[in-house]
Amino acid sequence: MDRLTRHQLKQDDFRNGLEEFEAFFKQHYREILNATILVVVVVGLAFGLRYYTDRQEAQANTDLGAALQTFRAYVGQPAPGAMDPGGPSFATAQDKYKKALEQFQVVVNNYKMIPRPKAVAIARYQMGVCQALLEDHAAAIPTLQEASQGHDAEVASLAKFALASELAKTGKLPEAAKLYQELADHPTLSVPKASALLAQADAYRASQPTLARQIYERVEKEFATNSAVSQAVKQQVASLAP
């Protein structure tokens, strides 16, 4: 009898709990309903945003791939009987780089708001390269400056390397040398230390051959075990003015 009473008490407690919850729900059902709707909307928006951004990133990569294909396209008419190179082809390199520049610009303009804009970073760097190849140095320098400040270290290094080259071409050798030294001090996979120092030495070849030789010798000593680097240095030193 005592056990039955305890069982009945548990049932009563459970029933009372349900009744209290029902009363609370009836009293606050609008707030509960609104909160539930809000959760559903927020979760739905989160999934929708993720789906949208994934689609945007995929499309950005597709558009970037098309622009890169243009950038690497064949120039000129294939020789009679030669295999078709496939993909786009252009009569002149200038035509090719103009078209590629347009396509890279589209990627930058259309996808700059996506959360992980790797494609945009690459496209902006490639824009600067196209402008440089078209000898539009006034446009290439600010484009590459912006690209060199991106969050992706590898792309930023490539942009800084190209920017240094543009600065050297336009007579801003001290600025170029500073960038090359920064790249050498903070090497990446895309721009190793040896590449940065060799480019720095190349920039000094015409105006300061003695300084260029010193940098070449430094590289040769530091990378003595790297046969490719040693060979490149020897070739550059051999062609250097006395």
Image: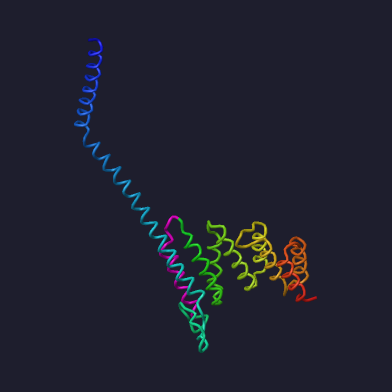
* Residue lying farthest to the bottom in this orientation: 80
Where residue 85 appears, as percent x and y from the top left, is 49, 80
Where residue 95 appears, as percent x and y from the top left, is 49, 80
Q: Could you tell me which quadrant the C terminus lies in? A: bottom right
Where residue 232 appears, as percent x and y from the top left, is 72, 70
Q: Could you tell me which quadrant the N terminus lies in? A: top left
Left or right of 165 on screen, residue 131: left
User: In the figure, 80 relative to 232: above or below?
Assistant: below
Foreground pick, 74 / 41: 74
* Residue lying farthest to the right in this orientation: 242
Left or right of 22 on screen, residue 157: right
Foreground pick, 63 / 78: 78
Where residue 109 appears, as percent x and y from the top left, is 42, 65
Q: How many marks?
A: 0
Q: Specify start and end residues of the magenta stretch as a single range.
A: 95-115
Left or right of 204 on screen, residue 104: left
Is 44 in the magenta?
no
Q: Residue at x 65, y 72 (%)?
A: 171
Left or right of 50 on screen, residue 86: right
Display coloring: rainbow
- The image quadrant of residue 188 is bottom right
Is 103 in the magenta?
yes
Q: Residue at x 65, y 66 (%)?
A: 176
* Residue lying farthest to the top in this orientation: 2
User: In the figure, 3 relative to 85: above or below?
Assistant: above
User: In the figure, 158 relative to 26: above or below?
Assistant: below
Q: Main secondary structure of the magenta part?
A: helix
Q: Residue at x 62, y 67 (%)?
A: 164
